[in-house]
Structures are given as structure tokens and as C-alpha cells.
Image (cartoon, coloured by chain):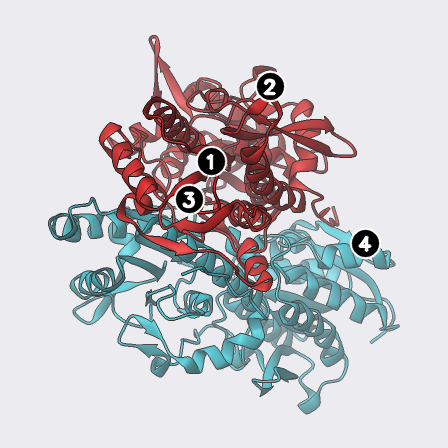
Chain colours: A cyan, B red
Amino acid sequence: MASNTNAVIGQSGGPTAVINQSLVGVIEGLYKQPSVGKILGAKHGVRGIIDGEFIELNGLDAGLLEQVAQTPSSALGSTRDKPDEEYCKKLFESFRRHSVGYFYYIGGNDSADTARIVSEMAITSGYPLRVYHVPKTIDNDLRTTDHCPGYGSAGRFVALGVMGDDLDNRSLKGVKIDVIMGRDAGWLTAASVLARHDENDGPHLIYVPEVDFNEDKFIGDVDRIYTKLGRCVIAASEGIRYKVGDKNSLVTEKAMRGGEVDAHGNKQLSGSGALGDYLSELVKRQLGSIIQQRSGGKLRVRADTFGYLQRSFPTIVSQADAHEARQCGRLAVQYSMSAPNDLVSGSVAIKRISDAPYQVDYFPTALTNVARQTKHLDPSWVKNGCDIADDYLRYAKGLVGPLPIPGKLY
Amino acid sequence: MASNTNAVIGQSGGPTAVINQSLVGVIEGLYKQPSVGKILGAKHGVRGIIDGEFIELNGLDAGLLEQVAQTPSSALGSTRDKPDEEYCKKLFESFRRHSVGYFYYIGGNDSADTARIVSEMAITSGYPLRVYHVPKTIDNDLRTTDHCPGYGSAGRFVALGVMGDDLDNRSLKGVKIDVIMGRDAGWLTAASVLARHDENDGPHLIYVPEVDFNEDKFIGDVDRIYTKLGRCVIAASEGIRYKVGDKNSLVTEKAMRGGEVDAHGNKQLSGSGALGDYLSELVKRQLGSIIQQRSGGKLRVRADTFGYLQRSFPTIVSQADAHEARQCGRLAVQYSMSAPNDLVSGSVAIKRISDAPYQVDYFPTALTNVARQTKHLDPSWVKNGCDIADDYLRYAKGLVGPLPIPGKLY
């Protein structure tokens, strides 16, 4: 390609604490490519491309780039737009107008699908475009890759948050419910298990979308733990769901009676305390009077929804995650220039070399291997419908990094 | 006092990230006092004293103590019990039985009042007891002291949380409401203003209990910011209240239609997402269709309740706060042995020497100067009912410590 070929970078979907590491990785990668002319940052993802809203990223100061890399959330702005055919036509009009030959899209499942569609349309229409998806999602639900940049840092936030909350509950007792992000997969909720250090540490119960949620079983679980310990800390995924006949229905939907739907057809689960409050009321109603009769005291039940703090809290970053996010950005550029198996359009994937010491490698994969389908928790990693197995710990420890060990006097 | 005089330490009320620094400070202080025999940690505050549940704290390893100091939440367990006369009698029975001559109580407003009552009963009944209150509260609402240990670290969490959330909102737009702890005073919510660095950074609107909440003004404020910036980040205290005639009524109460009351007559505000969801619905209902007409797009409104994460998140600690909490514990012991003005029962208070460089000193004060009444934000620090003045920044920067500066590309 000629040196007047320009590159576009975009960020899409929910932000993470390290998505800007990937952005800076792509920029650094492009700085080494003499065949690339302008480096255009699309403001708010595909939306910025069709609106012609670009930020020129050539020749930025290394100090600023490092500061951006360490800043959570999408520095270019993000979008939930999901291009249809009409939208894609406009994308290509913009690509033509700005002589774009490379398109790097940092995002999750939906963004990988956008990249796939754009890449396929480029081939069909004969437009010379190389498209690379850079994986990013706190949900950790992309296929092919061992794990997703963004997950380790969000998992670190969840593990620390539940650890502190368990110490809080140990001190004031009662039942505490923590609602954790994850629409379709329980990866992030599973990270709460890393908070445990000693026997009897919470979380005592963990509920993920991979297992049907049953209110009677839930209440039985809480009663069992509370009877044993006089307290109970619960980590519940925002995506937990009932089995109704052959179908599933979200507990949150019952709690919210309806709720919003985004452009991808996904229900709004975050940014509301409805699920936590619903579970809280359920425990009070079903166990309140029984426990009061048994112990004489009023049952204290509280719920917190960790919300957006999980994906954008400054300073809570896994070092491994930050490093890998940066590498994925750099490699997207490298692969787009010359990849193994000639995958000059594709997605960057991570391969696990060893759990301890934690070690990974990277490889390019076809966009069709990443887009659309959700990668769920291994079913064997969910114990009794309310706990996470040790195999998950082996998988997750390296991603999240070393955690503090609570000091206790009893 | 003879060397068979023992000391009791208790922790009370909501935990903080540095309450164990104070506990370890008291223990270290007592290790230097040959006149003190046993050091008894009361499990769950006054509750442990009447139940005779003590942990012996003599001769603990310095490494363990340091680990405990760095662990959030109350290592001895906490309580919400508020002693009445009958309860106090039982306390003195326990003090007699265990030859207790010193009582150190680490807590907030209610705990200072408990210390005051116990101290007064000791004098009335002629029982030789020295009682020292060690201040602790994320609410920062104790009188006499310049600020309270626990506030700086919680303020740091809030500032970082809102900073990240503002970057998140900058990336995906819409209206975001963050509900922050603080039943009667807006100190912790005010700390959100520290998240701002550049013009147009959030939080754009800040609501505290010190100013009457008015729904029409609130909606007008949100509309004004949204019209200007296309987005709006709001920090609202859980204790915001309407003026109804001569009385106040909590917005949360309207949102929860009732709600729990604790032993001190305080309404349960935390551990529920009701207020955030109520404000969120209010914005959607009042502004949703207007903004949709104006911009063509659906108004995105989300709410997060920061909840218990604010007071017990491991690793998010202000260094100044940790140091001062430790010092307050050490000085409580020192003052109880020999204090200026002979205040051998009292509370430890902090005096501000200078804002920059941040410097403080300590002094003993009478329990009646601390207990009961709430210290509110200076009214002149609240601007237009929806912002915090620069005078607060001067007050708070040293308490919270240096914050990261977000790297931006536009």
C-alpha cells in the first residue's frame, strides 16, 4: 500500500480500566509503520467515522501517551451503535474520503461483529481494507482467546471490593448481597471467589448466569450459611436467570418489571439497584421472621450493586492485564501488516502458556472465530449452583495479580 | 492505679478503611504503659463487654499488628448497640469483674455519646474509670476536631470513583447519578468535587443534605448541563431532603416508602439502590421526551450507589488519614495517663496547622464537645445549591492525598 494510506482507530462498547493501553499500543505500533500516513482516532467509534469526527494522533508526546494509557475509560469516546447495511455504506464513504486502508477496532463481542461485517463488505466491494479487532471486555466472554484484556483489572476490583465487604460484614453481621456485572456469563462474578483467604471468609455464595436461578434453593443456601456463621455474603451476577419451561427469564427483569433495551437488543441491567433490592426483600420476607424467632434479633439485609465502578476505577489495575492490553494493540498493527497464515484482517487472541508462573503468548485469529457467540464459564467450575471451583482460581490468579491478605485478630 | 488495672478497647459503628490503624495505635500505646495489666479487645464493641467476649491483645507480634492496621473494617467486630441505663449497669458489672480501669472506644458520633454516658456514670457511681473516645467516621461530622480519621480514605474512594465514572460518562454520554454515603452531612459527597481536573469535568452537579432538595430545581440544573455538554454527572448524598413546611423529609424515604430504622433511630439509607433509581426515573420522566425531541436520540440515564465499598475497600487509603488514625489511637492512651488540662477522660481531636503543606496537630477535648450534635458543611461552601466551593478544595486536598491526572486526547 502507498504511504498516503491512512489508519483509523476506534473504541467501542463499555469502557475498561485498560482499554486505553490497547489504544496506545495501536498508536505505538503505527508509529513504526512508514507505510501508514495519517493516524485518525474516530470519536465515539463507528459513529465518529460516519460523522467525520477524527482526532489526529500522529506524533503525540510519549509522556502524554503513557498518561492516556494509564487512564481508565475510552479516551476516543465510545459508542453502542451497531452498523446495519446503510450504516456500513456510510462507513465506506468515509474510508474512501479519508483514504483509509487500515481499521483497528478495540471492543468486545459486538465490536468484533462490527469488524467482521466491515471486513466482509470490504472484500465484497473490492475496497482494500485491513480490519483488526483488539479484544476488550470486562465480561471475558470472547471465544478463542484464553481471556480478554479488561477482565483482569475488573476482576481485581471485584475481588478487592468483596474482600472489603466481607470484612465489613464480619464486623456488623447480617446478610449482604453484592451484584456484579456480567450479562450472559459469570466470569466477573466468579472473580469474587478470589476474595477468600481463610475458612469462613466470604463470599459464601456465588450465583452466575450459567446456572438456573431458583428462589427456593437460594433461600435455602442463605439459611444454611447464616445458621452456621451468623452472617452471609453473596455475590450475584446481574445476569442471573430463571428457567421457565424451555426459556430463560432474567431475575432483573422481574425486579424492574420491563427495563430498557440497547441497540444490540441487550436489556439494561447495570445502572440500577433493582436486582439487589429485589433479592434483599426476598431474603427479608422469607427468612426475616424465622431468624428473628431463632435468635431474637432483627435480620439485617443489605445489597450493593458494584455498577460502573467495576470497569473504570482509576488505580485499580492488574499489571498483567495492563501489559497484555498494550501488547494486543501493538500486535494488531503488526498482524495487519504481515500475519501468520496471512490473517491481515482478524482479531488478536491470547494463549495461556502456564498458570504459575503466569505466562501467555499471542496469535491472530479470524474475526468469525470471535464475533457473536458468548464464551461461558466452564460448567464444571460452578459448584452446587452456588460456588466456584478451585480450577477457576488457577485460571484467574495470574490475571488479577497478587491481593492483600487481611490481618485478623479472631 | 495498680498494675492489675486492665484496659478494654472497643470499635463501634460503621467501619472505615483506617479504623484498625487507630486500634493498633491504642494497642501500641498500651504496650508502653507498665501500669496496665491485661489489654482486652471487646468483640463487637459494648456488646462484647456485657457478654464477656474479649480477645487478649497483650504481646502481639509487630508484623501481625501492622497487617491488621492495613486491613479495612473493624478487626474486633463492631456494633450498633446504644447503651441505655440497664445496659450501662451491665457494662460496669463487666468492668468490675475484669478489673478494668481504662476504656478506649473507637467510633463516631453515637460512640462518643456512649463514651460520655459511661464516663459520667463512672463519676456518679465512684468507679475509677478513664474513658477515651478515638474519633472515626467517614461522615466527618464530629464537632471540635478539624476532621475525622476515616474521612480522608473514604473521600479518596469517592473522588477516584467519580473521576472514573466521569471518564466513563464522557465516553458513552447520558446522565449519570452517583449516590454517596452521608446521612446528615454532605462531607463525603463534597469529596466528589476533587475528581474534577479540567473544565467540563464532572461531577457537574453536587447535592448535599445541607441544602433543601427541590425536584424542579434539580431537573432545571440537569437540563442546563445536558444542553451545554451533552452529558451530566451528578453526585448526590444519600441524605438529601425536601423541606416540607418547617420539617425535612428524606428523598430516600419517598423512594423507599418507609424503610428500616436502627437502634439509634437512624433510617437505613445505605445498602439499597432506591434513591439512585428514584432520581433516575425522575430525570427520564421529566427530561426524556424533551431531549429526545431536541436531539433525536434516546436519553440514557444510569444510577450507581457507591454503598459499602466507600468505607471498606482495601488498598484505597489516604496516607495522611492512615497516619492520623494511628496517632489518634496512640494519643488516646497518652492523654488517658496524663493529659493537658487533666482531661484523663475525653476525645482526641485534630487541629489544622496549615493547608499546604498539609500539617496538623492533636489535642484532648471533653466528651461533651464531641458527642451528639452533627458538624455540617460550612454553608458558604455550597454554591447555588448544586456545587462545592474552592474553600472546600483547600480543606480537603491534604486529607485525601494526591490523585491521578486523567490523560485526554480531546
Instruction: Residue B187: name its quadrant.
Output: top right
Q: Amino acid at mark 1?
A: Gln
Both labels 3 and 4 in a single chain: no
**At numbered mark 2, what does the secondary structure look like: helix, strand or loop?**
strand
Q: Earlier in the sequence, mark 3 or mark 2?
A: 3
Labels 1 and 4 touching (C-beta < 8 A): no
Give the mark, 3 or 1, whose residue is nearer the N terminus.
3
Which amino acid, by three-letter code, is at mark 3?
Gly
Q: Identify the chain of the residue marked 3, using the numbered disc in the image.
A: B
Judging by the rendered image, the residue that carries numbered circle 3 is B10
Specify the farthest residue to the top. B246
4 or 2: mark nearer the eye: 2
The label number, if any, that marks residue B383 in the structure image: 2
Give the left or right position of residue A350, taking residue B100 as reference: right
**Residues indicated by labels 3 and 1 sit on the same polypeptide chain:** yes
Residue A259 image position (x, y, % from top left): 33, 48
Residue type pointed to by label 4: Leu
Mark 1, secondary structure of its residue: helix
Q: Quadrant of residue A99?
A: bottom right
Residue located beneath label 1 in the image:
B292
Whether residue B196 is visible to the viewer of this picture, yes or no, is: no
Q: Amino acid at mark 2?
A: Lys
Q: Which label sits in the foreground, 3 or 4?
A: 3
Q: Mark 2 to mark 1: distance in Å?
A: 30 Å
* Cα–Cα gap, marks 4 and 2: 34 Å
Image point 76% across, 52% down: which residue? A55
Callout 4: helix, strand or loop? helix
